[in-house]
Amino acid sequence: MKPLTIGQLARRGGVGVETVRFYEREGLLEEPARKESGYRQYQEDVVARLRFIRRAKELGFSLKNIKELLALRVDPTMTCAEVRSRAEAKVEDVEEKIQALQRIKKALKKLTMNCRGRVPISECPILEALEPQEAD
Amino acid sequence: MKPLTIGQLARRGGVGVETVRFYEREGLLEEPARKESGYRQYQEDVVARLRFIRRAKELGFSLKNIKELLALRVDPTMTCAEVRSRAEAKVEDVEEKIQALQRIKKALKKLTMNCRGRVPISECPILEALEPQEAD
DNA sequence: CTACACCCTGTACCATACTACATAGTCAAG
DNA sequence: CTTGACTATGTAGTATGGTACAGGGTGTAG
């Protein structure tokens, strides 16, 4: 397979060329092989990595978080138990996010229902949506 | 009910005093009543609004987005059909986020399973996690 | 009636995550 | 063998979402 230039990678990953270089500086993407000219040469799999980063950002993960998620496979200095416990912690984070989103979704649905039924929308179900778990 | 000071509100909402004032400037919180001294006076319900903002941020919504979500009930210039169609659009966004998170969760679980089973973790299931819907 | 914690406005600064040059070299089509 | 799109490095600027003063007034407990 012919390697990709930075421009091809960026287009396929849905980000700008500058962003790719930025992610490289920040350690989210490995430094790729180079041609004699200095041009970066990327393999296909970097496209998936780039898309993962983009998606995860939309889900409220910081680049630091995303780096940790991606590091769960790469680092050979971590023991299996370490990897597992980190992954399990991430699973919990993710589950919380899912639940919060489900409450928002439910609230939004309620809003559309109220509306359909011509109930005045003076009350705001969205605000109740996230309350149940807020026990402080 | 006795109104809350900005400090009490901030503590209960889990943010800083400066953040409350910042949200007010940005239009996420309404300008509250004031005492003669100029002190802001908040009602209990603002606590829920503040917590909603905090949570929604963690889920990757921008303040602009959150403002829109909160506006779904307040704006009297919107027709019912408008409110409904906006809410339905938000429901779709939210559903996509939920699905993406579920894929990440699945991938993380797979990671912990592989680990438990002593399978080498050279492959990265996380990277496959978000691919299915990326059809571009 | 005086501490001390809290509030006011305004402005400046900060971290995160890009984004946009400036300046120079590369590559491929015609 | 040139021309135009692309790549390189480096540095500076931007948008978002706060955070931290400075300089002053308020409120209440002892």
Image (spheres, coloured by chain):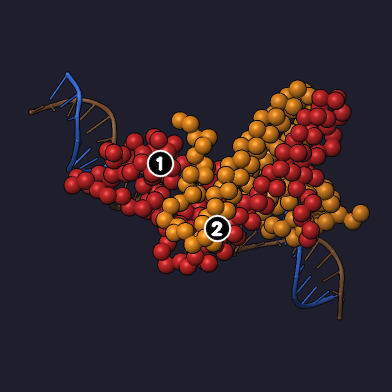
Chain colours: A orange, B red, C brown, D blue
**Up-down: is A87 above or below B80?**
above
Q: Residue at x 68, y 34 (%)?
A: A91
Secondary structure beneath dot 2 equals helix
Give the x, y percent position of residue A38.
79, 53
Q: Position of residue A98 (x, y in %)?
A: 64, 42
Question: Which corner quadrant holds the C terminus of chain A?
Answer: top left
Give residue C1's quadrant in the image.
Answer: top left
Residue corresponding to mark 2? A112
Residue, far right: A1
Chain of residue at mark 1: B
- Please tell me which residue lies in front, A6 or A76: A76
Question: What's the residue at 41%, 64% (across, down)?
Answer: B76
Q: Find numbered disc 1 in the image and state the secondary structure of the residue it sits on.
A: helix
Q: Nearer the viewer, residue B121 or C16?
A: B121
Name the disc covering residue B16, or none: none
Question: What amino acid is labelled 1 in the image?
Answer: Val
Quarter of image, res B58: top right
- Please state, as top left, top right, bottom left or bottom right, where the N terminus of chain A lies in the image: bottom right
Determine whether, in the image, residue A19 is placed left or right of residue A108. right
